[in-house]
Amino acid sequence: MERYDFQTIESKWQKYWEEHECFKAKADSGKPKYYALVEFPYPSGAGMHVGHIKAYSGLEAVSRKRRLEGYNVLFPIGFDAYGLPTENTAIKEGIHPRQVTDRNIAKFTSQLKRVGFSFDWSRVVDTTDENYYKWTQWIFLKMFEKGLVFRDKTLVNYCPSCKVVLSNEDSQGGKCDVCHSDIVQKTKEVWYLRITEYADKLLEGLAEVDYLPNIKAQQENWIGRSTGAFVNFEVKNAGETLRIYTTRPDTIYGVTFMVIAPEHPIIEKNSDKISNIAALEDYKAECAKKTEFERTQLVKDKTGVKIEGLTAVNPVTGKEIPIYISDYVMMGYGTGAIMAVPAHDTRDYDFAKKFGIDIIEVIKGGDISKEAYTGEGELVNSGELNGIKNKKDAIEKALEIIAQKGCGEKGVQYKMKDWAFNRQRYWGEPIPIVHCPECGMVAVPYEELPLRLPPVENFEPGSDGESPLAKIDSFVNCTCPKCGGAAKRETDTMPQWAGSSWYFLRYCDPCNSEALASPEALKYWLPVDWYNGGMEHVTRHMIYSRFWHKFLYDIGEVPVSEPYAKRTAQGLILGPDGKKMSKSLGNVIDPNDVVDVYGADVLRVYVLFMGDYEQAAPWSEESVKGCKRFLDRVWSLQEKVIPGDEYRPEMVSVMHRTVKKVSEDIERMKFNTAIAAMMSLINVLSDKGSVNRAEYETLLIMLSPFAPHMTEEIYQRISGKILNEQSWVTYDEALCVDSTIEIAVQVNGKVRGRITIPADCNEADAVAAAKASDEIAPLLEGKTIVKEIYVKGRIVNLAVK
RNA sequence: GCGGGUGUGGCGGAAUUGGCAGACGCGCCAGACUUAGGAUCUGGUGUCCUCGACGUGCAGGUUCAAGUCCUGUCACCCGCACCA
């Protein structure tokens, strides 16, 4: 028969599906809904990556299976199109980022369609479309209204040569990515979203969702909740207190000094009482110059300066202790000040050793002359706490004492910081705020949204860390919506994470001009039933979007509190050399090349077969060929079709077993073993030399989520029907086993023979059969059987002496 | 340092959760068909010498039985990182 012509046949079915709107999700179908979501791509100029194919092929298989199972499936796609690379390309080519974006989206679209993904193309979302970012701005204003938006100063990476603020990614190693000059830390006033207000809700919400355990762990870690105590230390002759945060109030008797961050306000406030103020300022300036690189590389070497003129008093012991500044304490966590317990904290220990400060043991168990002891043990040198052995009890009692003395209270801290929400770039959503000299920060009225990006000639970065929008007078100068006076627009744009924080809501109702989506659509489709994406997005993107969603839930805009019922992540595809694919290593595989040579079905089967879906696996051209062979064998089975509306008797159990295996494995994302099971089935059928129609149709339906084009074609040829309109195949647990089975017989744990017994054989019969078998009987002669074990359907083991 | 993960043939990986280790695929070897084979088909393929022994990073342990459970240990990968 003719060879499988994938070019013709794949485009034939892609056209058919499109013309018949096979994958369009309809809100009023009467079927149960299923919302499968994949992370929408950033449309880069390089085009699609094989990683995208793997990321989408997983839920693509699930979606196709769900449709055959009778669900109304929403499987959408869109583009997260704002961002720096596009802007840089535009600058380089001297064209507008809009043009670059449109060009890249067109490229991605054609590539995705070529692979035959069953996306609902009528719901495509583009974050840079004004009908979309209108609602991104709308949500921002709602947050502004509810007090979740604020301005604050922060240190940013600044390149003095390019005069531009850089992200951490663009300033790796303390050098500017563009001109390679040294980055300095610069204070700048920027926008923040108060995500920390939602820290507890984000943490608690994890209890009600089905995320992979490691994903939950990463989110918990990112939020980083810790419980402890705030304690106020009186600062002598300054008339104020120094507030610290500690997770170990039980070690308060071991405090021998205090450390505050170099930027701590108490220094400036009391500069008149400090005799070495110049030294402190020098140190502070030195720290500001330190790059991220130096701070992390020089972790072990503690530096600092003692504050001369101020001392603190331990509120529990009354002891007077010195105060130091050091950059190992940061202003951004806790209160920017700590009580140092060198005996039981490695950082404090290093610092104390270097500065010759006392080290007092308060917990027994270590040797503090050698190193800090951070384990548990009996408390000593600790007044009323002495003798307590259990850490929890000790903390409890210490909190009691602190409360009694009125010098502190229980407290909670998070590692998660408020979300710095701005970029000084053109290609992003304008922040819809007006700065009025009279009224301060004023929201752009809702009816004026979208606040459009001005169409300008020159969108290169501004100077002194300003956005390019700052140069455009017609954009900047405006009237205050509140008082009508002259005012200036905010010129920063939103970060890339903004548009992706709610795109899954827009898919539910992508063309709505009255709301971000209609309440009916949201009620019908939410929550997302299954969300799959990369491990690199499980903290930032997922926490940001859960935060936005929870906010929208609180103001009544969405009907459920958690956006994603289930979240999984796929592993990377590595280069053929086993290293992460990168242009510089020249090990990048272009999915187009694979489609050109082998076809879309082969590519899809391979990315799912290459290994455990959740694990990284290297690309292998040879193995791609193996998948090609497999599909070719499925194709050539057409020559061996015989009539039959039911499975042949000898095929019943293997058919049912395979259907069970494939059905279950798709749900568990074990696509590799699902495909392996179908390969085994092909081997069985090849050995038989024939396949009947019932068997073939079942195989085609099982395979269709992976290789939809070929299976549609064959299905139509052998049955005259459309596979996509059929139902998913079912199995009967009782028919999965044969009536007789072969099991192994062990003697003293070693396999010595095998017997064939009825599947429902009882223990006595099985053991008897084992003992009587030709291979086993001789081994038992002259021996005593001490124990007989029979595991039903698996094994007989005879322990003999 | 903290959190997560992974170690199984020449390679990618299976193993119903304590029950025949190496499914399935690649590669390799042999054969068939061929003018030809980098196409296809058939058979073989964990290691070691002959009987039967050894084999899941390493060392112990529990068990009739361990890749799987326990104790210790090593290596690699990813994320966060002076988080008080």
Image (spheres, coloured by chain):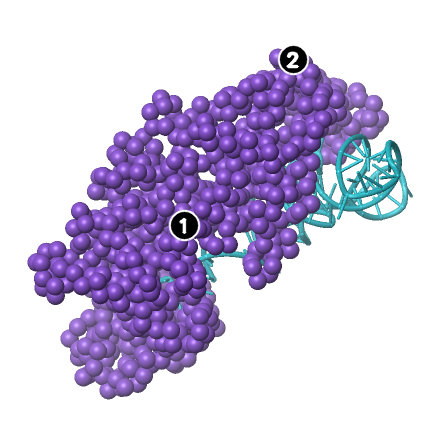
* Depth check, front residue: A657 or A104: A104
User: In the rendering, at what x and y percent does residue A748 appear?
Assistant: 74, 34
**The residue under label 1 is which amino acid type?**
Asp
Against A456, residue A517 (above or below) is above
* Depth check, front residue: A195 or A699: A699
Chain in cyan colour: B
Q: Splitting the image into 4 quarters, where does residue A275 fall?
A: bottom left
Q: Splitting the image into 4 quarters, where does residue A634 fall?
A: top right
Q: Between marks 1 and 2, how big is the CA–CA gap?
A: 52 Å
**In this rendering, would A740 be left or right of A275?**
right
Chain in purple colour: A
Residue named by callout 1: A102
User: In the rendering, at what x and y percent does residue A391 appear?
Assistant: 37, 56
Residue named by callout 2: A644
User: How many numbered circles are shown?
Assistant: 2
Tag 2, which secondary structure?
Answer: loop
